[in-house]
Amino acid sequence: MPEALLEMRDVSKTFAAPGRQVHAARSVSLALNAGRTLALVGESGSGKTTCARLIMREYAPDSGELLFRGAPIDASSHRNMRAYRQAVQMIFQDPFASLNPAHTIGYHLGRPLRLYGHGRSRAERQAAIAALLEQVKLDPELVGRFPHELSGGQRQRISIARALAVGPEVLVADEPTSMLDVSVRLGILNLLNDMKRGLGLAVLYITHDIATARYVAEDIMVMYAGQVVEWGPTESVLGQPAHPYTRLLLSAVPDPDRPYSAGVGVGAELADIDRIRREAAAPQPLAEEVHPGHFVRPIPARV
Amino acid sequence: MSEPVLSIRDLSIDYVGLDSDMHAVKAVSFDIGPGEVFGLAGESGCGKSTIAFAISRLHRPPALIRSGEIVVGGRNVLDLDADELRRFRWRDVAMVFQSAMNSLNPVLSIETQFYDVLHTHAGMNRAEARARAAELLRLVDIPAERLASYPHQCSGGMRQRIVIAICLALNPKLLIMDEPTTALDVVVQREILQRIDALRRQFGFSVLFITHDLGLMAQMCDRIGVMLEGELVEVNDAQSIYRRPRHPYTRKLWASMPRLRGERVRLEGGDA
């Protein structure tokens, strides 16, 4: 196994809410490798975005550590953090909120180039911007436009281009397609796949849409209540789901082959949603390998 | 077939502009039968929500209905005066909006929001409204204690179910749901839609279901209409739309959906 580019080891993060503690991440371990996509799936509140924010160093872990190229990140060193931020870039969910409405596309792409010293002269930067737009399959003519003149899909491509501007090694994409139309969504997913293969990027793809996860990711992790309950190669986890919560999630995915009217009724999992959620939220410290590289945290037997 | 609950004939709606009009809906016709779930599929801007708003006469300028009829219970909705319209809304047609969970008033308790509807449209007093509200909440699996809660104390899925319960308060003939679960997770989405499906079987109301998720639509609906740039390009029963789509656009929509099973292949399309 090659060394992971970025690793979370036993990372926990707890937030204080009135009268209770919210365990947003409980001993989460994951590894991102060059040229591969890891999908993190789960419903809202499962802790997916907390993981993204821990990786982006927006939150500091309560315990556990983050390793970049095998070494812990030294947050006290300005130079280290700068290198880390250059290497790890993020794409956000809302393409309407993640671009500044007062600035042109050229500004959005020129700024990271300038800050990270790619292209010192104006002409060099302009050439770099044109190349970036081309890379995300947009018309270089868009450079003088403002975000409001672009469609959602185009804006999301600008977000990707902005992330690519600094020459990153890791992309963290938090629900990058959930606000886009189906046909546009596919274009973004294809682009992510192209970037992964062409540039050898390590991608963390966060989503609640398991079908898109399957489309982009070699590996998948299913998260609930701050815990990763099942993980492994995508085909193995989706084909032979072992955790009741994974099965619940899969049975809820819209499936035209199972119309409600056919009287199939709810699956065993759906009839039992509350119990499965309750049990899946309990601490599950053990992990068991059910297939090669495919692990599950068994729900502790009720005593 | 018995008389349709909703019959739309040659409906054309424009958004009036300074220089030119945008033709949002172009001569669309379809019927929804009693107890039927009819889906309107299509991408942003195809006119599906414009139709939904027009059915309850909730469209506002610059939207202008150029021609056509919207017939509900034998009456053309477009001919109703203000009084008739007030009686028509909620009682004949109720609507769940896309971000319905945010359409609850944040400063009123859930009970008061039920009372608003039940008092205005059915003349109930506080006690009657409370009893009816508790009954309605039970339909969507929410305990009656929640009546005292405020919207922010409920989860998104719960708020969405509360809105649906309010919509069912006056036993409407038609429930319009415009992207009712887009903002929710799959598990919650499934719970809510399966509940709606059971309720329509129990009470016999019809549903106009709008979403861009064709997979979900094929699972939920009896019949589906596919819209493209204001036109209804294909209408058929749900399984035919799924298994034997005729229009190239319907095929394109299916082709752009990553699947959970089967071969993992690169799908084409969606380029900017």
Image (cartoon, coloured by chain):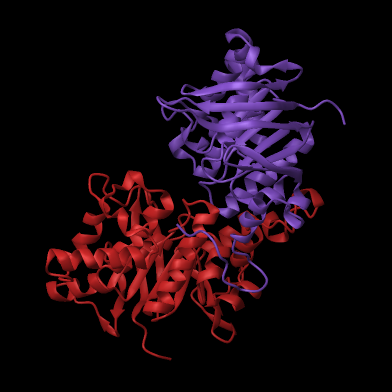
Chain colours: A red, B purple
Relative to B11, say whether A130 is above or below: below
Q: Position of residue B105 (x, y in %)?
A: 45, 28
* Side of A176 relative to B258 (left or right): left
Relative to A167, say whether B68 is above or below: above
Relative to B55, say whether A172 is above or below: below
Image label count: 0
The reply to whether residue A62 is in sight is no
Q: Position of residue A133 (x, y in %)?
A: 33, 63
Q: Position of residue A132 (x, y in %)?
A: 30, 66
Q: Position of residue A130 (x, y in %)?
A: 28, 64
* Side of A81 relative to B221 (left or right): left
The reply to whether residue B68 is in sight is yes
Q: Residue at x 59, y 60 (%)?
A: B256
- Quarter containing the N terminus of chain B: top right
Nearer to us in this view, B50 or A228 = B50
Q: Residue at x 61, y 32 (%)?
A: B26
* Side of A263 relative to A106 (left or right): right
Q: Residue at x 60, y 61 (%)?
A: A249
Nearer to us in this view, B13 or B96 = B13
Relative to B189, say whether A51 is above or below: below
Residue B70: name its quadrant. Answer: top right
Nearer to us in this view, B253 or A36 = B253
Q: Residue at x 54, y 55 (%)?
A: A183
Which residue is at the far bottom? A1
Which residue is at the far right? B1
- Quarter containing the C terminus of chain B: bottom left
